[in-house]
Amino acid sequence: MGAFPPPPVNTIDWSNVGFRVREVNGHIESTYSVHTGKWTPIKYVADPYMRIHGMAPALNYGQQAYEGLKAFRLPGDNDIAIFRPDRNAVRLQHSAEVACMPPVPVELFLEAVKAAVALNAGYVPPHETGAAMYIRPQIYGSSAQLGLSAPEEYTFCVFVIPTGVYHGVHPVKALILDEFDRAAPNGTGHAKVGGNYAPVLRWSDKARTEGYGITLHLDSARHEDIDEFSTSGFIGVKTGSGGSDDITLVVPDSKCVIDSVTSSSVLTLAQSYGWKVEKRVIKYAELPSFSEVFAAGTAAALVPIRSITRRGTSGFATGANVTKTEGAETVTYIPEGQEDAGPVCLKVLTDLKGIQLGKKEDKFGWRFAV
Ligand code: COI
């Protein structure tokens, strides 16, 4: 065996990684039996396929949950670090509980994630590209079960894929979805389960054909408060009159949103600069008062939002950044033709990526060595 980590493979054009499935060496699996009450030791499987009974509740009743996190090659390409896997481990436990599945112990999660990255280390993109290995842990009810009750077996697996950032790096236009509610008020919106994602596909595909790169959800009960983007968390920026450091980042306080690791990392960075952070209800009508909005997620990193459009409403006061046309209103943060993110987004993104890629000191203990 050669030195670890191996250099990046030469079968991928690293200057154009994109966000799509690419084949790697293999994945990690472990199974849980209700008879033993234990997870099996992790096993490496040298292909991307899962053997699963057709009557598994995962396939029939949507009994599954998943995670998204990333590994990065550090300067010199000689070390690999995973960003905050301990947070994803805890979040997967929460999602598993919501979908009535046993928790994956944090230690097992960390071991499996590290093993999946290590066994595919040649697919971690070169440091200089700024790209990452996207890690996708999953848990699902895997044994045959016809009645609507708990199965006897569950599978935990970890897949990895080299990726660039989802949504690209340029500002995107957002569309508020009023025709479709992502999560019921007392439902599963706070869990990372597939059922919160698949039904959005038709709406986000349609929005894309209309020029909107991302869709935004309001609270389902009243359509008055901001919840989250379909793929990522919402962060609004308030700029005060006290100079360039008079900044407040505002994130939604809603029981229908996923606890975003990226968003919480951004808030920690903001506090370390002396900025203020607020987690509170964000009213739709408040959108024009933000100087910047960005979406925060593992796959997305930070996506600067050019504008937010809502159809069939007139909830905004008239303002310099508000445009009203027949049947829609839009608040604009980044004018057409301008391709750079706003200064706040740029600063936190630079620091976040700096820590992830090992270019900045890891003051918060976020990098886990592989
Ligand atoms: C992630 O950002 O990790 C996600 O799971 C979002 C997904 C739609 C790509």
Image (cartoon, rainbow, N blue to C red):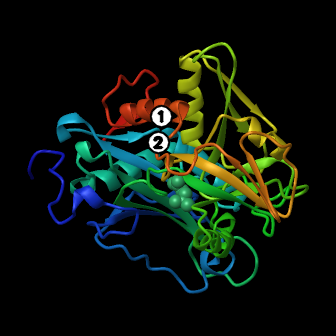
The residue positioned farthest toward the right in the image shown: 222
Residue under numbered circle 2 = 340
Answer few, some or many: residues within 10 Å of disc 1's Cα (few below 14, many 20 plus, some between 14 and 19).
some
Give coordinates of residue 206: x percent, y percent: 64, 74
* Residue kind at label 2, given as amino acid type: Asp
Q: Residue at x 47, y 51 (%)?
A: 170
Q: Earlier in the sequence, mark 1 or mark 2?
A: 2
Marks 1 and 2: which is nearer the front?
2
Give coordinates of residue 202: x percent, y percent: 65, 76
Give coordinates of residue 327: x percent, y percent: 83, 65
**Does residue 67 appear in this view?**
no
- Location of residue 285 (image quadrant): top right
Circle on res. 346 = 1
Give coordinates of residue 310: x percent, y percent: 77, 58
Find numbered disc 2 in the image and state the secondary structure of the residue it sits on: loop
Tell whether 155 sits left or right of 48.
Answer: right
Badge 1 vs badge 2, beta-carbon distance below 8 Å: yes
Q: How many marks?
A: 2
Q: Nearer the viewer, residue 212 or 160?
A: 212
